[in-house]
Amino acid sequence: MPTMEELLIEAADKGASDLHLSAGEPPLLRIHGDLARTEHPRLFVLICTNYPYPQFREKCLNAGANVFLDKSTEFEKIPDILRGLIENETKVSPGSR
């Protein structure tokens, strides 16, 4: 997964006017007015909040968030979620990156 700095450098190197980030989608670059896909994986969005109300959870998940956590009761789940992301990233078969 690229860092924000890497995405911005890529955008500048390719002459992009915009970098589009959307939950559940790979980053897109606007180049000469057209949107172009990047070679990066879809974005993973984790919401960790002190406002875990059902209406917020529903809105975030409907908008594309992968995980919605209550900071006061679920904060300890974050390391396991991140480990899972790292493990999935390293399971990409050789030559497919």
Image (tube, rainbow, N blue to C red):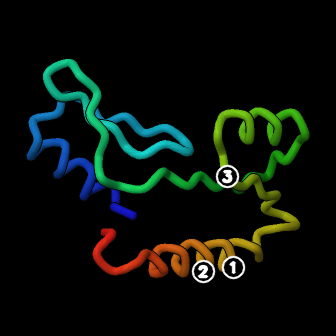
* Image point (42%, 56%), residue name: 41
Query: Helix, strand or loop at disc 1?
Result: helix
Q: Is residue 12 left or right of residue 58?
A: left
- On screen, residue 18 above or below 43: above
Q: Which mark is residue 66?
A: 3
- For badge 3, the amino acid type reads Asn
Q: Out of 64 and 72, give the one closest to the viewer.
A: 64
Query: Helix, strand or loop at disc 3?
Result: loop
| Disc 2 and disc 1 in contact, CB within 8 angstroms | yes
Q: Is residue 61 left or right of residue 10?
A: right
Quarter residue 46 falls in: bottom right
| Disc 3 and disc 2 in contact, CB within 8 angstroms | no
Q: Is residue 67 left or right of residue 55?
A: left
Query: Residue beneath label 2, please?
Result: 83
Position in image of residue 7 (x %, y %): 27, 51
- On screen, residue 40 above or below 25: below
